[in-house]
Image (tube, rainbow, N blue to C red):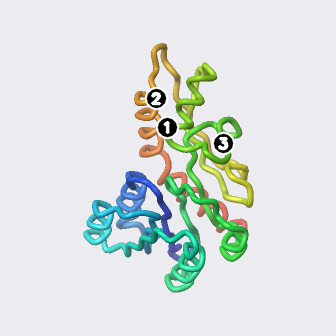
Amino acid sequence: MNSKKNIAIFISGKGSNAKNIIDYFHDSTKISVKFVFTTGENYDLLDFCLQKGVQFFSSNDKETHTQQQITLCSTYNIDWVILAGYLKKIPVEFISRLNHKIINLHPSLLPKFGGKGMYGKNVHAAVLAEKETKSGITIHLVNEVFDEGKIMNQYECEIDMGETIASLEGKINALEQRYFPNAILTIIEQMTIIE
C-alpha cells in the first residue's frame, strides 16, 4: 500500500469495536481513522475520540443521515467506511459513491442468521434456538442487500452445552476484538493491490 488510507467508522451501539479499531490503527503508517459517525448519543465514545484525535459526529435524524455521511466522507477524503455495529441500511447511492469500499462486521456465520432484524442479541437468540454447534463472526463487503455482500473472513467459536445469549455474546465480542482490526487492514491492502 503506497499511501495511507483514510477510514470512517459508522456505529449504532456502544462503540467497543470502534474503540478497538481506533487503538489498533493509532500509530499506523497504513490506515488513518478520520471520524466516527453514530446514530445516537454516545458521550463515552465522544470522550474517547477526543482523547485519540479522531473526529466524532452523531445524528438522530435518519432523513439526513446519508447526505451528512456523503458530505463527511468527501470532506475527510474517506477511502473506506467500516460498519462496526451499524444498524441502518446503507443506501445504493452511498455504496456507489464509495465504489463499494464498505466493510461490515456481522455477529454470525453468514449466510446463516443474516438480514433485516438480525443484529446483536437477536442473532444469538436465533443461533441458540436453532441448536447450532458453532457460531462466529463474518466480515464482508457491503452491497445493496442486507448481509449479502462478498464474504472476506469468518472466525468461529464453539457453542457449549448450556450456552446462554449472554455467554455467546461474550464469545462473539471476543472474536470481534481479536480479529476485526487486522481483517480490515488485510482487506484494504488486498483490494488496493487489485485496483
Q: Secondary structure at mark 1?
A: helix
Q: Secondary structure at mark 2?
A: helix
Q: Are marks 1 and 3 in contact (CB under 8 Å)?
A: no
Which residue appears farthest toward the bottom when viewing the image?
75
Residue topped by disc 3: 114
- Under mark 1, the amino acid is Lys
Q: Are marks 2 and 1 in contact (CB under 8 Å)?
A: yes
Q: CA distance from mark 2 to mark 3?
A: 17 Å
| Res 186 quadrant in image | bottom right
> Which residue corresponds to the image point at 64% horizontal and 51% vertical from the top-left?
140
From this view, report whether residue 45 is shown above or below residue 134: below
Q: Earlier in the sequence, mark 2 or mark 3?
A: 3
Q: Position of residue 187 (x, y in %)?
A: 61, 57
* Label 2 packing within 10 angstroms: few (<14), some (14-19), many (20+): some
Q: CA distance from mark 2 to mark 1?
A: 7 Å
- Under mark 3, the amino acid is Gly
> Which residue corresponds to the image point at 46% horizontal and 20% vertical from the top-left?
163
Q: CA distance from mark 1 to mark 3?
A: 13 Å
> Which residue corresponds to the image point at 25% horizontal and 69% vertical from the top-left?
51
Residue topped by disc 2: 165
- In the image: residue 174, left or right of residue 99: left
Residue topped by disc 1: 121
